[in-house]
Image (spheres, rainbow, N blue to C red):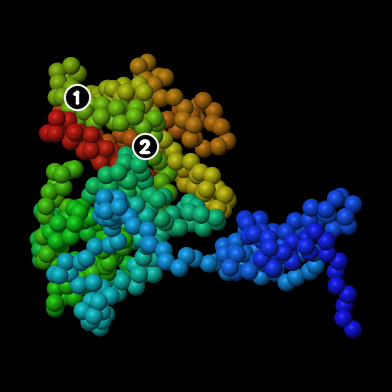
Amino acid sequence: MFAPRRPICHAAARQIVQLRRGVLAPSSSASRVVCTASSDCPHSSRTHSTTPPLKYASLANHPCHAATSFSASLPYSHPQHAPPAYAPAFQQPQQVPPLQQHHHQQQQQTTEAQTFYRRELPSNLHSFTSKAGRALFKECVAAGHAEIYFSLSGNFTMQSEPAFCGLGSLAMVLNALTVDPGRRWKGVWRWYSDDMLECTHTPREQIREKGMTFAELACLARCNGLRVVAKRADQVSREQFLKDLARVSASEDTHMVVSFSRKTLGQTGDGHFSPIGAYHPDKNQVLVLDTARFKYPSYFCDADLLYDAMQPIDNETGLPRGYFLLTKGEAKPLALCRISVSDLQQQRHDWHRIAQLFSCDLPSAFRLFHHHHHPSDDPINVRTAIPSVLIHILSSLPTSLPFLISLQPPGVDLASATQALANHHATDIITLLENTRSIPLYSHVRDALAHPDLANAFPSSSSQPSPPLSAAEQREVTTALATIFILAAPRELFVALPRHLRVAFEDLRARHALTPLLAGEVDRIGEQLEVLFNSYCNKCNGKGC
């Protein structure tokens, strides 16, 4: 049995027969036969396709290669296949004009020239991962001069910004020495990263642009609880440097960070900070753990050459570079006091004035002090003159920045990490204020602040401990902070005073008479003030004040 054929429109059938007999001339529409019957034809709504002989139709016009599927137009179901893509028998490849091609190559070369994927180490340096570097390191380990490497390698991180070599080196050492920052890094974790380190006197934006100086890194290290021994290259011999290398590399709790010029080593760039990871005394090779891994790998360098690289003058400070010996200190990383920070532009202007005030104006005024007060060696007259000196100092401060020292609040991060830390911090602040009230200088500062010129000079600070203090308690806090400021003021401020007054202030400011908690805060603030004064004073005509 054969299945009955499907009915077909008579007009369409007639056209197909004519096509096969060659009666109907081929045309552009010959490949599509459309039913032209009247609307009452049962097949009037269908469109039929047929295939003309190849001598009348090209492959391009074949319905199988048309834009719409041939089988989709059939009046019955038919498996559908993706039509193959036919290309002309011969196609000339597209030619790029020579001028346009040259421009494209030149643009690509320019783009590549503006970016870098690392640098090649100079031939006098041995990559840590090279065959020579691995051999040197194995010998260092066998000789016991790579002990410090393991704590550093377990906390090795790459600096997050091209100018953050100092911050990256310091963050690595802080984590290697297991210093708790006392504040949150991310999530619930307290950890050091270079982007959370910042000096009071050097904003992070400025460090990102210019980097850090030798003194700024020493100050920042102390502010984060490290004991720092800073050695300038012009103040230490080559032999002492080699002895420090041997001692540090064999230690587990003392780290060395070197500040040197890359140019001396044959590298590109100039000033750079990096920790030391190992030392080979026999071959005089030192392992530099370069924090700029995107530029150079860690490498072994001749120790004498590294010493020479610390000698060039830093254009920013006019002084040579050097190295630091860093150990974990007893001071808490989170300071109890801080130098007040206001609007950045206003702060820079005020600190320039304060630097000139402390380095030039006040010492000049103190040289004439005895002409006005005629103090003698009588203890009574000296006791009377001390508040006068303090009034002169405190009343000379700019009105826009009268409150130089403020208490460091626990902060949201510290309090949210654990309430115990916040409570401990508040307890330390209370202890600090009590320690300050117990020293003799406190009473002299209190008498000075009672003077009419200073009665309203120091407004209350928003960073005082909670709950809110009464007016009397606030006055005690103000007096304590002013006392800490006088304790931390640079020694040069008082050298121009008459001898007996100078001796009296030396006794009042003696560190041995302070409790460890108070002495630590005074040292911390004192170092920041010293860096500030040096930074701004050195900018006065390029010759200091």
Residue 394 placement (x, y as % from top left): 31, 25
Residue drawn at the location 74% of the way across and 66% of the way down: 17
Q: Nearer the viewer, residue 396 or 189?
A: 189
Helix, strand or loop status at disc 2 = strand
Residue tagged by mark 2? 339
What kind of element bears circle 1?
helix
Rendered location of residue 321, percent (x, y): 17, 52
Q: Is residue 541 above or below residue 191?
A: above
- Give the quadrant of the C terminus: top left
Q: Which residue is mark 1?
A: 361
Percent across and percent down for residue 18 are 72, 64
* Residue 358 in sight in this render: no
Residue type, numbered disc 2: Ile
545 left or right of 100? left
Residue at x 14%, y 73% (from the top left corner): 284
* For residue 473, side relative to residue 223 (left or right): right
Q: Is residue 78 visible?
A: yes
> Where is residue 485 drawn, in percent x and y?
33, 35
Establish if 491 lies above or below 424. Answer: above
- Amino acid carrying label 1: it is Asp
Callout count: 2
What is the spatial separation of the Cα atoms under label 1 and label 2, in whole angstroms?
Answer: 21 Å
The residue furthest front is 23
Residue 1's quadrant in the figure? Answer: bottom right
Q: Nearer the viewer, residue 463 or 444?
A: 463
Residue neighbourhood size for the residue with mark 1, other residues' Cα within 10 Å, grouped as few (<14), some (14–19), many (≥20): some
Tell me which residue sits at (40%, 31%) in the image.
342
Picture residue at 19% right of the left edge, 57% below the top: 268
Numbered circle sitting on residue 116: none
